[in-house]
Amino acid sequence: MDDYFPSMLGSLLATIRATLLRWWRTPRIRRGVLLSLLGLTVFGAALAIGVWARACSGNRCPSIEGLDTYDPDQASKVFAADGRLITDLGIERRTVIGLEEMSPAIIAAFLATEDKRFYQHHGVDWIRFFGAVKANILAGGVAEGFSTITMQLARNLWPEDLNRRERSLDRKIRESKVAREIEARYDKDKILELYLNQIDLGNRAFGVEVAAQRYFGKSSRELNVAEAATLAAIPKSPSRYNPRRHPARALQRRNLVLGLLADNGSITREEAERWRAYPLLLSSRDDFSGVAEYFVEYIRQQLDARFGPRLYTDGLRIYTTLDLDVQQSAERALENQLSAIEAGAYGPYRHQTYADYLEQKAESDDNAPRTTTPYLQGLAVTLEAKTGYILAMVGGRDFEDSKFNRATQALRQPGSTFKPIVYTAAVRAGIPLTTVMVDEPITVQMPGNQPPWEPQNYDNTFGGPIPLRQALYKSVNIVAIKLGMEIGEEAVIAEGTRFGLVASPIPAVPSIHLGSAVVKPLEMIAAYTAFANQGERSTPMGILRVEDRQGNILWQPRPRLEPVMDPPLAWIMNGALQDVVRRGTGTRAVTGISFPVGGKTGTTNDGNDVWFIGYTSDLVTGFWFGLDEPDRIKPNAQGGLLAAPAWQQMMSEVYERRNTPGGWPQPDGLVSVEIDRTTGFRASPYCPTSVRETDWFLPGSEPNEACPVHLPFGAPAPVYDAAPAAEPPPPDGQ
């Protein structure tokens, strides 16, 4: 029974076949069939001619007139200072080049893959057309297409009029007719050039030049046969054969293209086999699309405000100040230190870690970017001191998760990194760093009905009499408050303005001397260029110049330097800030570092913000760590503990590639005096050698009275004239 129906069906088909053969052998019937087929052919041809004639009626086909002045949108290119490409700004990445500038291997590979009879047909390859019809009939569906390069160009140029998703005979006829018009007007080389500059090659790369740069890190003219075949493999399905995302698939199809090149006679079979063994070597050196994302967005906003839509269509060339090596060092140092803090390397950490956050985010399938994040954040900025060029900028931990740039958009308390500004104002006012103040409990009366303020030092202890220099390098809060109150809040505010802290007004309250007023981190870090430059502050800038496609300069901003203090005052403060890293709170920043460094740690009283801003004679780098929603990072959070090691890691790495920086030359206009460091007075002949040292002063601020402490039998202190003593060598590192 199981064999009955198949057997019956076989008998039926055999009967039908025999009947048809008997009819076909009958001349009258055979003649009728042939006449019918001829009639159908004539009717079909007439129908096709009619459809072809009416295909573009009613402006249903695009006009090719614009091809004479064809100028496609080109993304603007963003380059680092050394000319390496960082990224593109635009909807489509494209660089238009001439056919003669392309590698012959590219031309051969695309012709072999997409249209081997390109130079023989006139827009429609009828041999391929009938071959595709046959293949599709045998397959019972769409198994093969017959689009020529010219037809592909037509739908790539006018995707709205010739929508590839519209799978209809009408669209195909319109596409063919436009291709014929293009072929009638332009020579083959021009058509091929347009096609190779227009084709989608994945990863938002349009045209062979951008694709060559993106995938292989070189110009299309330099591609070898295997690399050219890799590009020619992509158009069949740009997402499926993207070599970065699907290298195995791309390699398999590349090898198929190499076979087509051999079939076409462009290479021999032996050459094809040799190139099949060539590895898929994608460039990492020149693909920095994931590097410096906060910096790229920072300059994009500036360029958008200046150039508008042209930024995304005109193919501008944007040369930035970014040093990719310094940038990558900053990113590594920041993430390493953030991970170390979260891992408990500096004591227990109680907040959600970045790793836990990512795992939770993956489970919730929530990929929406946010402004604030629950995990520990950080920032890093490096400026070239003499120009203000931004060599590195990291505005946060994960640009995809949070595009909020903490370096340029946040307002945070600078803590003790603000103290050098208070001390600079004091020295400017004639109070030398040898002045002794008493570190003791104080009560500050507040205006109105506010309760009195009783500030504390970080460790809640008091040290008694202490010279200002020592109070600065030990970051003693009480002395900074007393010093700031002595010169007045308005003087400190004016000094902050000189240093460029203008993003947020500084209120006239005593706590500003401890860095309670919020600042923009980029401004705070840039303020230290005044110390590195011996008195001149440089304004941060990220753009060197902007050129059009022809190389004409459209915009070239110039470095801006603002005088903040005279060189003698800057040199005095430089010495004090070198003491911070030599024997103060910032020693972790210079472990293993032998070149001259100045800097200052910063910690807010509540432990919400920790900083280290350090500098050499050529670079200024600042690190900040904290939570977006201000909260104590951890118990005993300190800038010297949490931020300074990141600076040390980064600078050690950076200066492995750069010349070791020198110190700061001593300017004219300083007075040197031997003093008793325990009192700040001039050293008398009776002072013990152990308390004597030479210090430097602005003229008129040096001590003229001899130390009254170290005198025999209580004799009155001798009076010295104001003439400076013989100048000793400057302190170490100056």
Image (spheres, rainbow, N blue to C red):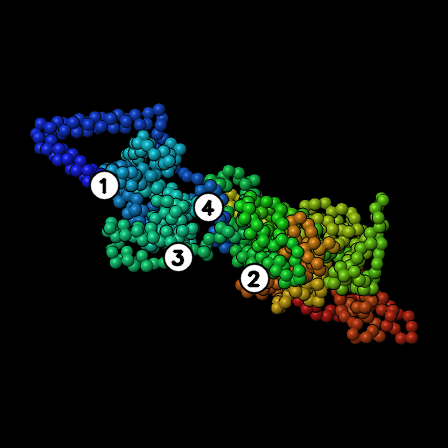
Q: Which residue is mark 1?
A: 1
Q: Residue furthest top?
A: 58
Name which of mark 3 and mark 4 comes first in the sequence. Answer: 3
Mark pair 4, 1: CA separation: 85 Å
The tag earlier along the polypeptide, 2 or 3, is: 3
Q: Is residue 256 left or right of residue 469?
A: left
The C terminus lies in which quarter of the figure? Answer: bottom right
Q: Which mark is residue 224?
A: none
Which residue is farthest front? 1
Residue 349 x, y percent position in the rendering: 65, 58
Drawn side of residue 383 relative to residue 20, left or right: right
Q: Splitting the image into 4 quarters, where does residue 704 fall? A: bottom right
Distance CA(mark 2)–CA(mark 1):
86 Å
Do the numbered discs 4 and 2 sit on residues whose CB atoms are within 8 Å?
no
Q: Which residue is mark 2?
A: 654
Which of the pair 522/320 is nearer the observer? 522
* Quadrant occupied by the N terminus: top left
Q: Which residue is mark 4?
A: 551
Horizontal side of residue 489 vs 708, given as left or right:
left
Q: Please name the residue that numbered disc 3 is placed on.
A: 281
Under mark 1, the amino acid is Met
Q: Residue at x 49, y 49 (%)?
A: 87
Q: CA distance from mark 4 to mark 2?
A: 32 Å
The answer to whether one can see residue 588 in this image is yes
Which element is circle 3 on? loop
